[in-house]
Structure formats: C-alpha cells, structure tokens
Amino acid sequence: MDEREVPRERPVDWRRALVVVTGVSALIAALSYLHVSPIGQRPLTAQLHLLFDVAKEQSVATAWSAMLMSVAGVLSAVCGSLAWRRDRTVAISWLVLGTGFAVLAIDEVAGVHERLPEYVDLTAVESTLGYAWLMLGIPIALAIVAGVWWCARRFARTTRRLLLAGILVFFAGAIGVEGLTGYLAANHPDAHNAALPELIHLEELLELVGIGVVCCAPLGALAVRARKKHPDELSLALR
C-alpha cells in the first residue's frame, strides 16, 4: 500500500445486526410460547413448540443461544488479534472476554450450571430459593459482571456500554427471573403454577436478547477499511 494513501474506514453497522438478532430471538420465544397461547393446542403449533421450546436443552432456542455466544467469542478474539500490536492490554482484555464467551457457549450446550447441586449440598436453601443452584449462580454471575466491566473499561464507550448492558440483561433473566420463579415454587406454589409459562419465556427471552447485545458489542469496535485506489480490497480494522 502506498504510504501516502490514507485508507477509508466505515464503521460496522452493529445497530442493524442488533435489530436482526433481537428479532430472531423474539421470534423463537414467540414460536415456543404458541403452545400455551389460545391457539396452542392445534397440531401445527404443538409441533412448533416442541422444536422451539425454550425450556428444553435440545431445541432451536438452545442452538441459537449457543451460536450467539460462540459468535461473541470469535468476534472478541478478532478484536483481540487486531489490537495486539496497538495495545497489548486491550488485546488481552478482548481475548479474556472471548474465552469467557466460549465457556458460556459450552455451558449452554452441556448445562453444567444446572448440575452444580449434584456436587455441592445446597438442600438447606431449597425451601427458600426453590432452585438450589442459584446459591452458586448468583456469586458466579456477580463475578462475570465484574470481569466484563474490568475488561470493558478499556474499550470505547459504545462497545463498553453494549457489553455491560447485554450481560446485565442476560443475568436479569438467568438470575433475576429464575430466582423469582424458584422463590414462587418454594413459597407460593399456586402463583408459580399459574405464571410458570410466562416466567419461563420471559427468562429465556431476556437471556437471548442479552447475549444478542453482547454478540453485537465487538462489532461496535470494528470498521471496514478500503483503499481509495482499490476499493474492492477490504480489511477489518479496530476503531
């Protein structure tokens, strides 16, 4: 490249990507909820519910969530590699985030967090929380939020806000709504049974929307670079 040539950079459109992934997440949750809606007893909607059921591990919802987490990990690794020569601290922050998102993707498929009570006796809190794993899940969630903040404070404002907003929305579902569901199950079973379908779908929708925001956060740090003399030669650059 000619040293005097200044390449043109165009920021990656993270807003459009966010609209798309949020729309897909909402559609998946809606197709899952069809089964408990007034038209849910029809054969077609029952089959759609089985395919998209957000409460089951082997479903389109789980696959979509794991894919979003995996993409977030890959994009974070790309940002880390682009930042390596410019700022090693920023690069390491991105790589740490990418590793964390990869771990979350594996957990989403394997359901490791749901098996935690098998290894730790938490029966003493089941009568209060309903879901014993939350006693371990809450401190883990706080640690993850702190870790994301620690990494994101080195990033540009837009990327930092997207990361923090996404992870907070994710845990609002994974910990907040699930905690409410567990509390109702342990202390108010009638209210729990009446509201369970709505609570499950709200929880899973918040998780999907949150991880979708996180997935788009690295896009806010990227730009497409093109040479003026050769506009068809494109490359990614860190903003």
Image (cartoon, rainbow, N blue to C red):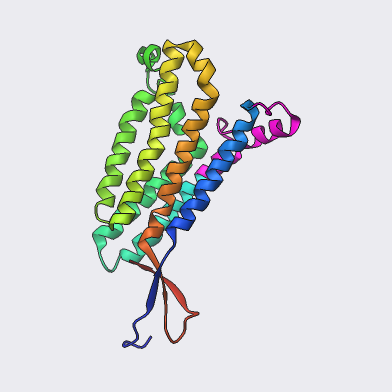
Q: Where in the figure is residue 121, as x and y percent of width and height? A: 37, 18
Q: Residue at x 44, y 56 (%)?
A: 15
* Residue at x 46% of width, y 75% of height: 234
As for residue 6 lying within the magenta part, the answer is no
Quarter the C terminus occupies = bottom left
Measured from the top left, where is residue 9 in percent x and y? Answer: 38, 73
Q: Position of residue 131 (x, y in %)?
A: 43, 20
- Asked if residue 46 lies in the magenta stretch, the reply is yes
In the displayed image of the protein, which residue is found farthest to the front?
38
Left or right of residue 184: residue 86? left
How many discs appear? 0
Residue 113 picture location, percent across and down: 43, 31
Q: Residue at x 55, y 46 (%)?
A: 24
**Range shown magenta:** 38-65
In the image, is residue 33 above or below residue 155?
Answer: above
Point out the residue furthest to the right here: 43
Instruction: Choose top left, top right, bottom left or bottom right for residue 207.
Output: top left
Residue 111 visible in the current orientation: no
| Residue located at (31% from left, 64% from top) | 83
Front in this rendered view, residue 92 or 209:
209
Q: Where 163 sits versus 135, above or below?
A: below
Above-or-below relation of 123 to 116: above
Q: Please indicate, yes or no, whether residue 64 appears anywhere in the rendered image.
A: yes
Instruction: Indicate the quadrant containing the N terminus: top left, top right, bottom left or bottom right.
Output: bottom left
- The quarter of the picture where residue 11 lies is bottom left
The part of the image, by quadrant, that contains residue 133 is: top left
